[in-house]
Amino acid sequence: MKKLTLPFLFATLALVLTSCVLVELPDSSFHFDSNWQRSNSGAFVFCSNKTTQMRYSFRIPVGATIQKVTETYKGKASGETLVLDRPVSQLSQEGDRYYFVGQINFGQGLVPQTLQPEVGVLSIVVTPFPPTITPSIVGSTTVRVRVDTTTGSLYGVYTYDVYANCP
């Protein structure tokens, strides 16, 4: 009985494996950027001490309808994750591309790279002498966008370095 069972399992496994078909992923052409850019490399970054605008865009397959957009922000330094369901009404469309532009805010309960809960925000302005503060990297945040459509899901991922002391 064992001799019949083993060949039968191999035949079944071969049949299952041959039923898999390699397909091309749809060209979603995700693009990510922000209103802050590293001057030496051109990479887009987040700035924790200034208002940061993040933009992403993508294309969906012809005939598809967007049902849901989910953004996941994960902080490398903090390990914290923030998940946002983005209303489809917040997307704008130009031709076959859809765009989202939003303001990124850092702090407790917002985009990861947070202050500790016991640290509060004070309204003290410190002006160093001489006033030449150099921007410094304080971490990074990975943004993953999932777009669910009537024909499937699209994904886009970008990791932004996060800088403090932006001019």
Image (cartoon, rainbow, N blue to C red):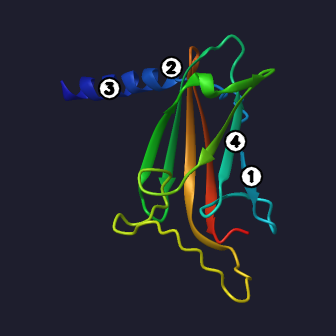
Q: Nearer the viewer, mark 4 or mark 3?
A: 4
Q: Residues within 10 Å of mark 3 (few under 14, many from 20)?
A: few
Q: Would residue 68 appear left or right of 12 to someone viewing this image?
A: right
Is mark 1 in CB contact (under 8 Å) with mark 4? no
Looking at the rendering, which quadrant does residue 12 occupy? Answer: top left
The numbered mark, 3 or 2, whose residue comes first in the sequence reads 3
Q: Residues within 10 Å of mark 1 (few under 14, many from 20)?
A: some
Task: Return the residue at label 4.
Answer: 55
Between 49 and 159, the one lying in front of the other is: 49
Q: Give the alpha-carbon distance from disc 1 to disc 4, as whole Å.
A: 8 Å
Q: Would residue 132 appear left or right of 13 to someone viewing this image?
A: right
Q: Secondary structure at mark 1?
A: loop
Task: Return the residue at label 3.
Answer: 9
Residue sitting at x 71%, y 26%:
92
Q: Nearer the viewer, mark 2 or mark 1?
A: 1
Residue 126, position in %: x, y? 60, 79
Q: Give the alpha-carbon distance from disc 2 to disc 1, as whole Å.
A: 47 Å
Q: Nearer the viewer, mark 3 or mark 1?
A: 1
Q: Nearer the viewer, mark 2 or mark 4?
A: 4
Check the image and report above or below for 110 versus 137: above
Q: Give the alpha-carbon distance from disc 3 to disc 1, as whole Å.
A: 57 Å
The type of residue carrying mark 2 is Ser
**Is there any visible trace of residue 22 in the rendered image?**
no
Q: Secondary structure at mark 4?
A: strand
Residue sitting at x 56%, y 43%:
144
Q: Residues within 10 Å of mark 4 (few under 14, many from 20)?
A: some
Q: Which mark is residue 19?
A: 2
Task: Return the residue at label 1.
Answer: 35
**Which quadrant of the rendered structure holds the N terminus?**
top left
Between 3 and 58, the one lying in front of the other is: 58
The type of residue carrying mark 4 is Arg
